[in-house]
Amino acid sequence: ISVGTCATFGGIFAEGGKERSGLHFIAEEKIEHYSKWWEKSISLPGCPVHPEIIAKTLMAVDENVKLKFDRMRRPKNFY
């Protein structure tokens, strides 16, 4: 689970022109660096991420709830 805009998309640091990115994205451009984990990943962008989104996502994972995701692996229930 990538928590926060920096962990998900690279945040303001991705704008620096150096090889800085989030787990699967530089801004909204998908990268392949960790592609083997794509299907198991959950992106929770935000600065900060609302605590309720973190808690409800973790509870869903713990309870084996089938989450639906958008094209950036964000849970559709919250984004």
Image: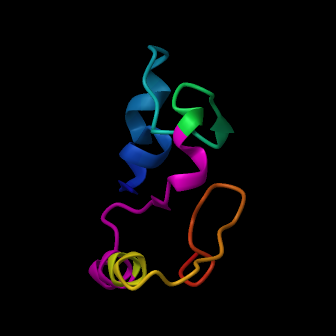
- Look at the image and say whether residue 52 sits in the magenta stretch: yes
In the image, the segment drawn in magenta is 37-56
Q: Residue at x 45, y 38 (%)?
A: 22
Display colour scheme: rainbow
Q: Identify the residue at the far front of this view.
A: 64
Residue 76 in view, yes or no: yes
Question: In this rendering, would 18 be left or right of 74?
Answer: left
Q: Identify the residue at the far right of this view.
A: 71
Q: Residue at x 45, y 60 (%)?
A: 45
Q: Could you say where residue 76 lies in the image, as x and y percent from the top left?
A: 63, 77
Residue 77 lies, with reference to residue 26, above or below; the image says: below
Image quadrant occupied by the N terminus: bottom left
Residue 25 in view, yes or no: no
In terms of image quadrants, where is residue 16? top left
Q: Could you say where residue 71 lies in the image, as x and y percent from the top left?
A: 72, 57
Q: Could you say where residue 7 lies in the image, as x and y percent from the top left?
A: 38, 45
Question: In this rendering, would 29 be left or right of 13?
Answer: right
Q: Residue at x 52, y 42 (%)?
A: 37
Q: Nearer the viewer, residue 15 or 19?
A: 19
- Look at the image and say whether residue 59 sits in the magenta stretch: no
Q: Residue at x 41, y 63 (%)?
A: 46
Question: In this rendering, would 44 be left or right of 38?
Answer: left
In terms of image quadrants, where is residue 44? bottom left
Q: Nearer the viewer, residue 12 or 79?
A: 79
